Amino acid sequence: MDKQRKKELKQQAQQIEIYMGVVKITNTANGKIYVVSYPDLRDKWQFIQNALNSGTYSSGALVRDWKEYGHDAFRYEVLEQTAQQGESREEIGRLLRQMQRPWLEKLQPYGEKGYNRPSF
């Protein structure tokens, strides 16, 4: 592939909007929820399901319930999203924390209500 074509493809890739945001996973069997944010929401539910199936997802309690209740007991919902364009990793992390904080405060997905752990 010539240099000009590579340059064109790179420019096209940079113009693709990637959506970052906050999602909620709900266990419909017991009502517990998990609220988490990601810098790229493309195919995220598929990624999460694969990690839960393999037991490698970051929330051990969610993995245990996934194995107990099965995938049909869980619902995935995007709570908030926004396009990300060229921000640094640090800036994206800051924006995601800003987006996630109000959802955590509102939904309180801790203890008996959810899978999140409170941060102090």
Image (cartoon, rainbow, N blue to C red):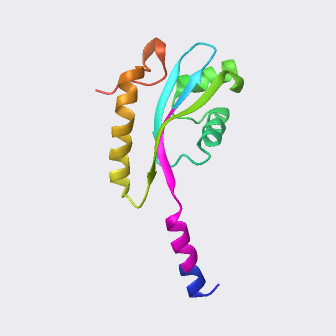
Q: Which residue lies most toward the left here?
A: 120
Above or below 41: residue 30? above
Residue 111: where, in percent of width, then height?
44, 15
Q: Where does residue 29 sit, x and y in percent of width and height? A: 64, 14
In the rendered image, residue 69 lying in the magenta stretch gets the answer: no
Where is 39 relative to 64, above or below?
A: below
Q: In which quarter of the image is residue 12?
A: bottom right
Q: Work out which quarter of the rendered image holds the N terminus and state it.
A: bottom right
Residue at 51% across / 54% down in the picture? Answer: 18
Q: Quadrant of the C terminus?
A: top left
How many circles with numbers are drawn on the protein? Answer: 0
Left or right of 7 in this view: 106: left
Residue visible at 52% across and 22% down in the picture:
33
Specify the segment rendered in magenta.
8-23
Asked if residue 15 is among those painted magenta in the image, a careful observer would answer yes
Residue depicted at x 62% and y 17%: 28
Is 49 situated left or right of 31 in this image? Answer: right
Q: Where is residue 23 in the image (x, y as percent from the top left)?
A: 51, 34
Relative placement, left or right, of 1 versus 120 is right
